[in-house]
Image (cartoon, rainbow, N blue to C red):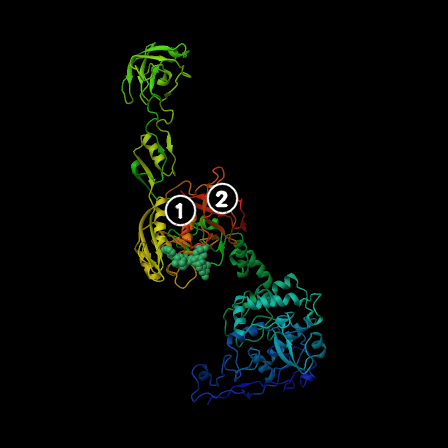
Amino acid sequence: MPAPETRRKSAGIAGNLACRHGPSPAGCTRGLAVSGRGRAHRPARRAVPARRARPAPPGGRPGRDRRRGRARIPRGPRARGGRRRAPHRDRRRRRRRVEPAAPDPAPHARRGPREGRQRRARGGRPRARVRRRSGARAPHPRQRRAAAGGRRRRARRHRHLRVAPGRRGRVRKSRGSPRLGRRAGVHGPGHGVLVAAARRGAPRGARRPPPRRRRAADVRGGGRARFRRAAGRLAHGDAGDPPDRRYRRPAPRPDRARRRPALDGQGGAAARGRGRWGSGGRCRGSGCGPRGSGTGRGGPPRRCRRRRRARAVGAGGRRHPRRGPDPARRARRRRADPLRRPRRDRLRERGALAARGRDPRRPRYGRDLDARGNGGLDWPRGGARVIAVEEYTGRVMADAQPLPAEAVPVSDARGRTLAEPAIARLEIPRFDNSAMDGFAVRFADVAGATEADPVALRVTADVPAGSTLDPAIAPGTAARIMTGAPVPAGADTVSPFEGTVGGLADSLGTALVWQEPRAVGAHVRRRGEDLKVGDEVLPAGTPLGPLQVAALVAAGIAEVRVARRPRVLVASTGSELVAPGEAPGPGQIPDSNSTLLALLVADAGAEVVGCARVDDDPVTLTRLLAATDADVVITSGGVSAGAFEPVRQALEGTVSFEKVAMQPGKPQAFGRLPSGALFFGLPGNPVSVAVSFEVIVRPALLALQGRGEVHRPTLRLPAACGWRTPDGRSQYLPIAVDRDDPARWAVRPATAGGSGSHLAGGLGRAEGYAIVPADVAAVEAGDPIEVILIP
Ligand SMILES: Nc1nc2c(c(=O)[nH]1)N[C@H]1C(S)=C(S)[C@@H](COP(=O)(O)OP(=O)(O)OC[C@H]3O[C@@H](n4cnc5c(N)ncnc54)[C@H](O)[C@@H]3O)O[C@H]1N2
Ligand code: MOO
């Protein structure tokens, strides 16, 4: 049968304590700190059965009980009936934290059973105590002496303190030192003494968080550190504090503050580091004596069976700080080397850069992503940071490089974008031709003609448009000529019918010109005055609308090179969606987004190769994406924070999900799919889709087509009324234009609901978007507003 666990007996106030410095606590001559760890007064080791230790079942309990052959101690907060042995991790943490210490206000304090119950009643856990396992070796007397020496030295150093630096809050039963006790604002001898270092200066009544939260906070450097910071603020003794709050602690010095681990969450090593060997504390490895054991002057650890690296930062996080330079110097050197900077510095730096709008961890599109854009795999997910619209669109645009060019007949070029400049093959006009119906004349003949004294010319030829004739024009003669017809070489001016007495009547006989042409060459269009052969008709990047295509034709161009149209797959996600025109059942709505997107994509010159609707199962979307050969995939919905977000679930880790500082359109996804397709995951709300397309997708689609200008022109119009704007986000408000006063158009929200992103009906009344910058708190009537009008 395994032996019952033995432990030191818990001694009450007047417990069975033996002290090396005196026969009892009362008789201690040293006045050193007493605690579970930094205790100068150690009780006589007396093996007594653990209270309420349950006997193990025959054969022992599974696991280590059986292995170690000892009674199992019930664990966990629920096992309150038995003495709780702190989890190993906690024991280690406590050991790390131990700071053998300053003169303690309660040198012989011990926790008694009543105090343990009080603690539990407050929701705390019993303070685990360091016990030596049955059979564990006692420290060698030399180790004990060395440890005691270290404690004494540190105690001397901190004599001015009332509470040892770095000591955690503890509840101790103590006879206490009346002097210190009173000055520290604690109760006198015989009472439970609250010496809570972590709570020093904390508001009265402040409670420590429950253990689980404390542990979590430790890991994050959050809750407890915050608590301590709050405590620290008061702890330095604000003048207005009541005297019992004004604990005398050394004022924070920059170096000390930097070193103090508990208050600033930074590495503990430097804080405790003393001398050449670093921490001056104990090695946390089991079986390893206190640092400096055996030498009394610090030194390398003798041995350590567990050489696990500690989690804490810096030398103090090591089980055995390496032999080497002073840790503070080493930390400075590390900071100087960007590749070896301590994590806290990197984090600090990242915070600073993030505040400037760039997170250095984040790959930049077009630069840090590999050819397939897979750098995105390492992107931080679900970033809490809201990024500016410009930053987000900047990333998108960096990845939207023009697709390869192709040649198309001009007749099919409408809506395409020139990939190369279009060069004129013909002159415009092709030849000198008449701008008017009338008579081709010699200016000298008609100079000085007036109504009172008209000039009569004999008509010798008739030149219609398309004529190949070039009749001679002798002095005193003229040729009848139509608009666009080549001007005979002998004529230099055209006199329109309106400047003659007879006009078209008798126009093949005599022309009686009464109006003198304004100059030589009047009404003659000169060859090549618009374009000459070889001139650039249109530059690359020009979108080809009707006007542009016509110019190409006029310049004799039959075929142009244009960027390939992006092939776009549109997919709406949502199990609530039914096809357009289909009657929706309960909980269902028509899928308007796929229609909206498909039309917007076509308007942007891209080709819709698929228009799909998928349910909220990410597998469905994954299959769809795996099967597509599109250049671009645009989805709607499924990118925010819900339980059924197929886009997020299917693509998290492949593309980046961001919160963009725009309203609507905050949740966005963008990246490159394994197929190479650019992916845009737009939020599902219909207005969000329209706005996101306008602000993010359309410019990218145009850029893929090599478009020179990807943004619509904006104009400033006054607001017809005021409206609310979102906090910290640029607003893209669907607007209608008031045209009552043609000299002063004004804009107003297209829907009564303002910028509600679900107002799919109101979207139909929108003529464009008002763009209100993020820092504008509200729009007042009459404010000039930047507006995009959507044709
Ligand atoms: N906890 C949070 N919830 C939400 C956040 C957030 O940051 N935290 N953001 C909100 C914002 S802003 C938006 S926008 C939406 C975007 O959500 P999803 O992208 O996941 O879109 P869904 O939830 O799928 O749909 C939103 C809405 O739009 C309707 N919808 C979806 N698809 C269509 C379609 N094809 N045709 C018509 N209407 C569609 C859908 O029924 C929903 O009503 O998230 C907020 N929530
Ligand atoms: O940002 Mo959401 O797109 O407002 O509705």
**Is 118 displayed left or right of 499 in the figure?**
right
Question: Which x, y percent locates residue 573?
Answer: 36, 57
Question: What is the three-letter code of the residue carrying label 2?
Answer: Glu
Quarter of the image for residue 261 reads bottom right
| Vertical order, 50 against 208 (above or below) | below
Question: Which x, y percent locates residue 723?
Answer: 51, 50
Question: What is the three-letter code of the residue carrying label 1?
Answer: Arg
The foreground one among 549 and 32 is 549
Number of numbered discs: 2
Residue 191 is labelled as: none
Check disc 1 and report its element: helix, strand or loop.
Answer: helix
Q: Quadrant of the C terminus?
A: top left
Find ligand 2 in the image and state its quadrant.
bottom left
Residue under label 1:
698
Question: Which x, y percent locates residue 240?
Answer: 71, 66
Q: Is mark 1 within 8 Å of ligand 2?
A: no
The residue sitting at the front extreme is: 740
**Is 468 displayed left or right of 56 in the figure?**
left
Residue 786 is labelled as: 2
Q: Is mark 2 within 8 Å of ligand 2?
A: no
